[in-house]
Amino acid sequence: MTTMKEEGNYANRPSNTAFTQQRLPAWQPMLSAGVVIPGFLLIGLAFIGIGVGLLITSRSIQVLELDYTGTETSSPCYQCTMSNQSNCVCKLSFSIGTLFKGPVFFYYGLTNYFQNQRKYGVSKDFNQLIGDVSYFKSPSSDCQPYQRVNGKPIVPCGAIANSMFNDTFKLYQIINGKEELVPFDGKGIAWWTDYNIKYRNPDYTPLKNAFNDTEKPVFWTKPAYELDTSDASNNGFINQDFLVWMRRAALPNFRKLYRRITEGNYKDGLPAGNYSLEISYNYPVISFEGTKKVTFSNVSWMGGQNEFLGIAYLVIGSMCVVMSVVMLIVYAKFRFPEED
Amino acid sequence: MFLKCSLFVEKERRVKANSREYNDKFLYADNRIKTSKYNIFTFLPVNLFEQFQRVANAYFVVLLILQLIPEISSLSWFTTIVPLVMVLVITAVKDATDDYFRHKSDQQVNNRKSQVLIRGSLQKEKWMNVRVGDIIKLENNQFVAADILLLCSSEPYGLCYIETAELDGETNLKARQALSVTSDLGDVSKLLNFDGKVICEPPNNKLDKFTGTLNWRGNKYSLDNGKMLLRGCILRNTEWCFGMVIFAGLQTKLMQNCGKTKFKRTTIDKLMNTLVLWIFAFLICMGVILATGNTIWETWIGRGFEMFLPWTKFQISTVFSGFLTFWSYIIILNTVVPISLYVSVEVLRLGHSFFINWDVKMHNRQTNTAAVARTTTLNEELGQVEFIFSDKTGTLTQNIMVFSKCSINGTIYGDVYDEFGHRMEITEKTACVDFSYNLLSDGAFKFYDNTLVEAVKQKDPAVQEFFRLLALCHTVMSEESEGKLVYQAQSPDEAALVTAARNFGFAFWARTPESITVCEMGQVVTYQLLAILDFNNTRKRMSVIVRDAQGRLRLYCKGADTIIFDLLDPSSTDLMHTTSEQLNEFAGEGLRTLALAYKDLDEEYCDVWMKKFLFVSAVLENREDQLAALYEEIERGMKLLGATAIEDKLQEGVPETISKLNLANIKIWVLTGDKQETAVNIGYSCNMLRDDMTDVFVVSGHTLTEVQQQLREAKERILSLSRVSDARNDEENDMFADDSVFEEAIITEYALVINGHSLAHALEPQLEIVFLDLACLCKTVICCRVTPMQKAQVVELVRKHKRAVTLAVGDGANDVSMIKTSHIGVGISGQEGMQAVLASDYSFAQFRYLQRLLLVHGRWSYFRMSNFLSYFFYKNFAFTLVHFWYGFFCGFSAQTVYDQWFITLFNIVYTSLPVLAMGLFDQDVNDQNSLRHPSLYKSGQNNLFFNKRQFFLCTVHGMTTSFLLFFIPYGAFSVMVKEDGSHSSDQQTFSITIATSLVIVVSVQIGLDTHYWTAVNHLFVWGSLAMYFAILFAMQSDGLFGVFSNIFSFVGAARNCLSEKSVWLVILLTTAVCIVPDLFVRSIRASLFPTQTDKVRQLQQSCKSQRPEEQNLRRARRTSSRRSAYAFSHQEGFGELITSGKNMRTSRVSSTCSYERTAPSSKWIENVIKRTNAVSCISFGSPNKQHQSLKQPDRLNC
């Protein structure tokens, strides 16, 4: 066992290096009381700090949520839920007590809606969506059953595109009994990467020509190249609303950004007063017990209102503090017999 | 080849000498040996076929097929195929390397040269070209190439000598004798015309049996084992011999004995297989739950959702949808059965094996051999050994006998005293006696006490007579080799004694059947040998009757002291008492003793006796008994000369190793072919048997009932004694309640010694349990006189009934069976025989390395493997079960949470290296402390680190982590909004958040599990994290999307998601929630219930600064009761061989007793004389001459 003398036959002697002899210098941390208790305390305090900060921030964010599904008879949109109603319009009135600080974001929300269903999720054709015209003629079989209609290929094909949210909203502020339109800003509501990279229009002018011999999705009233009549560049696969819709939600209850309110008199937010929201009610959700709602919200450094994070941080932080106290007691009572 | 074997069942073998045409008809195996599995062309198909036979690989192929069905496929094909291909490639590379080394060793053996008689002359041929029926010539010290029938040899009567160490582990020489009709075929021309035909048994594995007949010239001669030279033997003391090949290659007895190596599986392997089955069951349960969920969801919600996702077109019913979902979920959740588990385990074991191979502390300087892990699949089993079965000779002992001390006429020689008269410990540094003045001395002989030399020089008659006896009374043969006198003894004890006499000036030189020539103090003296009264087991002594040059008749006798003392003349009584005490002292030091005595005979008495002797020798009936009586008659009334003490040299560090292993709760059984006395003797010197043991039971019954009786008695005695001590304990419990020292002292220790013939009965079904129970109650078990088969049976017995891991260690072919039967076989390498090493799983040069192998490497391997597995299962559960929770929120549609690329790479790229680094380098306690605290080993024996409970805990831990990993982001994402107000609760952001949290959590977890952070660990842990982010951004980059837009649909997601503070807050929270409770539990456990490991670690940390010193565990030898014995590994019958002259060369037989006539065989001694220019062969005795020779050192070179 003692170190060998430098003699004898070494031909087969393994090399005596730190690696082969498993003597590599190493850091051997141990969970000693001196590290763990202050560590827990520090983590706990830090988390409590973050939690308090988050809660305060979150509380300062204003959120206004309005359900307009119309399942209840009292709802102004009730009549739109009746069958064979097309171009149904309903109006939702609400009032804001204090200034809703801007910029205000306007979302639509759906519940019990399974954008994350696997078959729903795969039902699209990537190649169409990056503007490869050859796939306009023969859409991917993933798009079934929205691949062809009347023998003609559907562009954009698939269930996701087909089910694009098509309610539209107009917001009025009622000033002295007169309705004043609140301007909506619909630019740049989708991700930059989606708008610039993931989705491309075919290189045709006018865009319409690319869609020759194709059909619009079954549920759509307008073809893809006419989604936004007011802005010619906001059409086809790079239409902002389309992009927002195509970015599937992770969970069955979700909301998606519809418009920003950043212009004109409303640059600093929605002033206190009465408002009326005009909804062109097209999207059916009753059949799967879904609900539709709209949300007004502003944001902070941490995004939108999120009580969960703040509370969770507080809970975990206090747990850490409690644990460190428990450990302190344990260590004090049953000291590790070091002299053994 | 297999085809041939199965079609052709050999009933008897017919071989014709020198006739290849005739023998070729029978398709006998040729002498080529093939252990390799593949060649270049068959490698790919065969290896792939083998790999797909493994359940795990087959499972992944099934998964792959499932994934190709579009209705089911929930994951792309590459998620399975990429890991599968990697696993297959790594395994294939390992198999290929293994096979390459087998090819190499095959080639080495096959290309050995031997001389074969072909086409009328002797030609050098490779071994692999030797065929059945060939006549081959063997020369001295050559390996026998095949099983051959001895035809003739250079020695008279067709005798030849072989060493069978490779076959049965016995190092003594064995004689083989050719048929007398063939023994004069001694030249090539005669042999060419030899056309004998042998009809014999088919190939079998019985080493000691052979039956056959030789038909030659119309006569039949029966053949037995005594005429066979088996492959693996070495020819010794025989210039050459010719033989005819009977069995070749794989059909030789040696190869038949090797058998197919059983594929050994470790305990953890078996456990792992069970666990994988459990996981399968678990997987199916999950699948069923989710499938049921799917059916329900489709019924209640999916139908309503049909507006946007019509399903009636391809699904007939909700139940069918559930059925499809089941398979989809099987695919998604497949990662709970970790594909990389098996290959990672292989890699770890390979790494651990390399560490064993690389260990400098297991490299032996003397023989220049390093330890070798020959099997790379058993390493962690080394950490769980409970029983060690050890061979004795060559394993515990060096099989070197050293003349260590003697008592002559009441004076002890051999001890060294310092100037104050204190006895000194003999170490390597102690100066040894300089024998260089004695030209015949053997340089290897070492003696430390100069007084004995002085006594010899002063011609003390007793001392002279003592050495004269040693030079005359033996059956050693002398030989000249390279100008030196070499002794061939059939037992190492005799060689030691004769060599001692030689160095002290009484060199046995040559013998004929009637004479012994000795070079006595420089004078050549020839004694007439009248009779050898041979050794046997009941006599326990041997004597010679010689007539010296002056015509005096004398009988010299050496033997066991108990026997000799009974035969002494009353005049020796005083001396006998003194000597007896001295013998006790020798025995206390673990030496093997012999008493020496002589008797003067008068001529008439001797004549009468010789006549009786001749008469009785010719008697047929009852000859043995009559001879014994006759011998005893003449051996009565001898005068005591003294006693010798021979040290059976233990291997270095054996007692220390044994006591270490005992402290580690490992039971060591010695299984030896040696005699009981020898075995017990060694037991004492290894500290396995001690005088403070309560009882040593010896079982030596010859019948079943006797053995049963003895076993029962022993057991009852133990039980009754322990009851007594228990009772006493109870009484005194109050007083000594906390005094553990007292408790330990009262624990009684027993030992069991059982003889081979009793063991045969003890191993019978009705007794085996009794035997095993008794043996397990004893601290030490020694089985002596056991056959190789019995060794295996004993191991098997323990294996079967004890569910404990067994390890067998041995050096000879007689240990092969037990090495193969035990869970782990260890071969001692560096000795000549390689059979044991070839059959073993680990090999090294010395027994003492066993403690390092087990306590350091074994423990580490087990520790690492356990941690590795725990973590691996944890990791995969945490990773996979997120999908289960997600199922409840995505309509049970088998939607994956993660990106497919993440699923593909998670196990093989993101998390494989840190855990591998942990599995390779982690050490809780360093090697010195592992050796210093052998009790750390017990956790392996008790299976504490990885068992079903541990598995359950780590899966629950994994499940909890997956739960938190899913639900914390779930809570946060239900209302998540980005800073720019756009929504961020989309699928891809969610997926990246969870994936990132997962990677961080498992990295932190591996950090907590790592006890030993080397640079490699740091590199791998941080590197894996860096790799994760690098790959994440690379895969979601614009460039890659531009090329493969179909596959990389996550483009831009990471950029958008990870630039959000809130996402990082979620990740931080998730990590903290997953880690903090675990950390809390760990530190509480470490403080409340510290394990032995924790304590040692603590100790190690606190005394890191001070340089650890090696503890001196060497125990002082205790004086113990006398165990003197004629403990020779002696065989009967050599005396007869000598007196009949059968084993002498013809030239010697013809010569008479005189010195001149024996000259031809002693030319070398003349050379010595010429060189020294002296008349006498040794410049001995005269101080003047001694001075001369000291002045001329060049003369001392002989």
Image: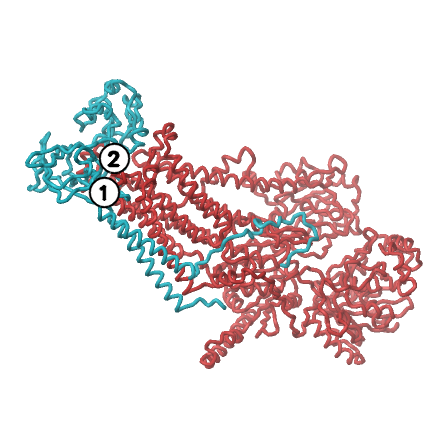
Chain colours: A cyan, B red
Instruction: State the residue in front, B352 or B274.
Output: B352
Q: How many marks?
A: 2
Residue A262: image quadrant is top left
Residue that badge 2 annotates: A120
Instruction: State the residue in front, B539 or B891.
Output: B891
Instruction: State the residue in front, B265 or B83.
Output: B83
User: Does residue A79 appear to the left or right of B586 in the view shown?
Assistant: left
Query: Amino acid type of disc 1?
Result: Thr
B1026 is higher (above) or lower (below) than B1012: above
Residue under mark 2: which chain is it in?
Answer: A
User: Does residue B661 appear to the left or right of B540 in the view shown?
Assistant: left
Q: Secondary structure at mark 1?
A: helix
Of the 4 image quadrants, the one containing the N terminus of chain B is top right
Q: Are marks 2 and 1 on the same chain?
A: no
- The local crowd at label 1, few if under 14, some if 14 to 19, many if 20 or more residues have their Cα within 10 Å, is many
Q: Position of residue A158 (x, y in %)?
A: 25, 30
Is residue B1000 visible to us here?
Answer: yes
Q: Nearer the viewer, mark 2 or mark 1?
A: 2
User: Residue, x 43% and y 42% (percent of image)?
Assistant: B1026
Q: Position of residue B975 (x, y in %)?
A: 24, 44
Residue under mark 1: which chain is it in?
Answer: B
User: Residue, x 22% and y 45% (percent of image)?
Assistant: A61
Pointers 2 and 1 in contact (C-beta within 8 Å):
no
Residue that badge 1 annotates: B295
Residue B667: image quadrant is bottom right
Instruction: State the residue in front, B626 or B279.
Output: B279
- The local crowd at label 2, few if under 14, some if 14 to 19, many if 20 or more residues have their Cα within 10 Å, is many
Q: Secondary structure at mark 2?
A: helix
B910 is higher (above) or lower (below) than A4: above
